[in-house]
């Protein structure tokens, strides 16, 4: 029997899923409020003529392409990829990248702000006894996953470093994912390191790996704890927004028993 596991968070206004000023805004129009729009569309119509005297329910949404569970395109990371080519936007991402075998790396034991290394990835793949193949979709389970809905979600969990990201990309991975706010470590930890060390190369280092090999990653995934290490597929087709740096996705894992 086929089983589907939802790997996406909600788009909602009352949960802190982004830093201040970056939250989605949703205005809900219920069936009573929707009467006015329906009546205006049909001159002479009276509300009481409608079944249950109800109009339509609709929502007005103000979003960033990086709100909710979304797929980042190489263009988000830099203007170029693959060592100098023009970086592709979300509408240009090959659909073949977005539906493939999934692999889960479990780094829930890493402390907040930890930057995962290539050695960590290699060790985790050995632990789960898996050899990567081209176009595998690799998702990273961090401590942030269980903090969704809490005020500290944005600053929770570990992140993927440059070398860890390149380890995946050099083996043909083109889509990755994480249940934290960012593929990289939370900004507050990177900021503290930058202030102490003055090394700008640590800023967004996992993202910037896309300059060398173009790839996409899914951010703000959810429910990765429910996945086995491998033996499932992931679907993460992005919304087709012309020229955009990201697109929302309903990321789903598919398991066949």
Image (cartoon, rainbow, N blue to C red):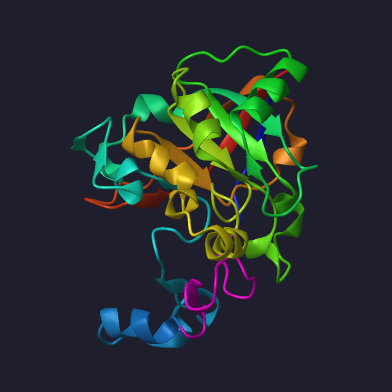
Q: Is residue 210 magenta?
A: no
Q: Position of residue 118 (x, y in %)?
A: 59, 28
Q: Main secondary structure of the magenta part?
A: loop
130 displayed left or right of 19? right
In the rendered view of the protein, which quadrant contains the N terminus?
Answer: top right
Q: Position of residue 236 (x, y in %)?
A: 48, 37
Q: Position of residue 48 (x, y in %)?
A: 47, 86
Identified at 68% across, 30% down, the residue is: 105
Region in magenta: 10-33
Quarter where residue 211 is shown? top left
In the rendered view of the protein, which quadrant contains the C terminus?
Answer: top right
Q: Nearer the viewer, residue 10 or 187?
A: 187
Q: Relative to 244, is 104 above or below?
A: above
Identified at 77% across, 19% down, the residue is: 127
Q: Position of residue 34 (x, y in %)?
A: 44, 81
Q: Relative to 77, is 65 above or below?
A: below
Identified at 49% across, 38% down, the residue is: 162
Q: Is residue 13 magenta?
A: yes
């Amino acid at each position: 029997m086929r089983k589907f596991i939802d790997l996406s968070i909600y788009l909602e206004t009352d949960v802190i899923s982004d830093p201040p000023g970056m939250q989605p805004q949703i205005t809900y129009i219920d069936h009573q409020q929707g009467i006015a729009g329906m009546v205006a569309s049909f001159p002479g119509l009276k509300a009481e003529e409608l079944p249950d005297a109800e109009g339509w329910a609709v929502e007005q949404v103000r979003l960033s392409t990086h709100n909710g569970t979304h797929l980042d395109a190489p263009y988000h990371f830099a203007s170029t990829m693959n060592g100098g080519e023009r970086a592709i936007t979300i509408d240009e991402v090959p659909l073949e990248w977005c539906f493939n075998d999934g692999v889960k790396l479990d780094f829930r034991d890493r402390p907040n702000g930890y930057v995962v290394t290539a050695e960590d990835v290699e060790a985790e793949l050995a632990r789960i006894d898996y050899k990567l193949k081209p176009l595998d979709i690799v998702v990273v389970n961090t401590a942030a996953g269980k903090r969704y809905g809490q005020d500290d979600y944005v600053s929770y969990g570990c992140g993927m470093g440059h070398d860890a990201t390149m380890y995946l990309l050099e083996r043909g991975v083109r889509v990755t994912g994480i249940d934290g706010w960012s593929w990289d470590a939370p900004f507050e930890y990177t900021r503290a390191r930058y202030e102490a060390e003055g090394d700008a190369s640590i800023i967004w280092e996992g993202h910037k790996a896309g300059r060398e090999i173009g790839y996409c990653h899914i951010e703000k995934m959810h429910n990765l704890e429910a996945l086995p290490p491998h033996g499932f597929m992931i679907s993460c087709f992005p919304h087709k927004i012309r020229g955009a740096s990201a697109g929302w996705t309903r990321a789903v894992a598919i398991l066949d028993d």
